[in-house]
Image (tube, rainbow, N blue to C red):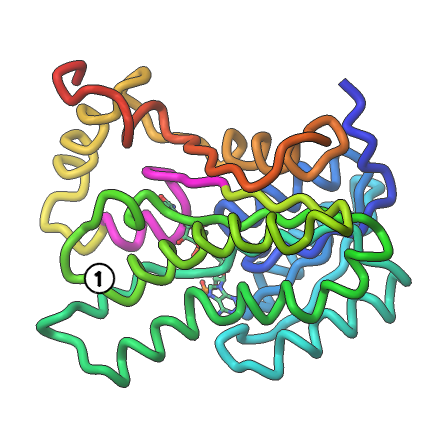
Amino acid sequence: MDLQLKDKVIIVTGGAKGIGEAIVRTCGAEGAIPVIVDRDAEAGKRVQTELQNAGATCGLITVDLSIPESCQQSVEKAEEKFGHIDALVNNAGRNDKVGLEDGSPADYVASLHRNLVHYYSMAHYSLPHLKRSRGAIINIASKTAVTGQGGTSGYASAKGGVMALTREWAAELLPYGIRVNTVIPAEVMTPLYRDWLDTFPNPQEKLKTILSKIPLENRMTTVEEIAAMTVFLLSARSSHTTGQHLFVDGGYVHLDRALT
Ligand code: NAP
């Protein structure tokens, strides 16, 4: 299937590692021009160099997205370098465990800056460009928004906000033909997930317990599986799909617990 993404400029926040990296690599393999926006300069450079060595074009902008001005600067830099922006993937975030009891109002607001506010800012500053290209937006959310987790008010509400904004923007941007969808992962092995697992006394045992609860094949979702859905939703092949919440999770959130 030709996804018709050749030479499309696609901004991917958090594109240096994990899920974002896989989206960047899949975009590159489809002939698109991914632009990594990430604070990890070293990892970003490594991915950019590998893509360039394979004959793809890839942009790299090193910023911390929780600083509001960095979003405007990132969009401006991408537009200056490539002349157009065809899609935005809002992906950067981290489950930062700001709880109701242990956190504070200031911690909560800071968590929203790490996980939600830059999704809005990136979309806001990209909008004039996306109007011109009749582009697409994909927001990466989390199962935590619909299942809860405990001890993570900031992250859970940010991801719930991401899902609500997907519907809201899909409605607002109908006149411009800009489609907006959310991909919702549950359990995906990434550098972030590995760090979290390593906080348990026996990470292997913990992983075994988690896998036993994933209905389809008792395994983690791969970063490539998240990327494939994301890139399909970015492409003209999903031209009548908007405002959707796509759970790419092996049935983790919706299938009957009795199946596991
Ligand atoms: P990851 O392995 O940490 O990769 C994310 C990348 O984004 C890292 O390079 C990270 O840099 C960067 N980043 C994070 N916040 C940033 C910021 N404020 N400014 C600039 N760069 C930033 O994470 P991942 O597991 O791939 O997660 C990607 C997205 O999927 C997140 O929104 C996460 O909530 C969501 N998600 C993941 C899972 C899962 O199982 N992995 C499940 C549900 C949802 P640093 O390393 O410096 O932080």
Residue 58, percent across and down? 77, 53
Left or right: residue 260 compared with residue 52:
left
List the residue tagged with mark 1: 152
Q: Residue at x 33, y 79 (%)?
A: 109
Look at the image and say whether residue 87 sits in the magenta stretch: no
Left or right: residue 49 compared with residue 148:
right
Q: Residue at x 76, y 32 (%)?
A: 236
Q: Quadrant of the N terminus?
A: top right
Q: Residue at x 69, y 69 (%)?
A: 61
- Please determine whether, in this image, residue 49 is positioned above or below residue 100: above
Q: Residue at x 63, y 63 (%)?
A: 123
Find the magenta span and give its range.
Answer: 183-197
Residue 82, percent across and down? 87, 61
Left or right: residue 182 compared with residue 11:
left
Q: Quadrant of the C terminus?
A: top left
Residue 217, percent across and down? 31, 15
Please identify the residue farthest to the right as the structure is shown. 83
Left or right: residue 259 compared with residue 144:
left
Task: Determine whether the residue tagged by mark 1 lies in a helix, strand or loop.
Answer: loop
Q: Amino acid at mark 1?
A: Thr
Pick whichever, 165 or 41, lies toward us. 165
Dividing the picture into quadrants, the one containing residue 143 is top left
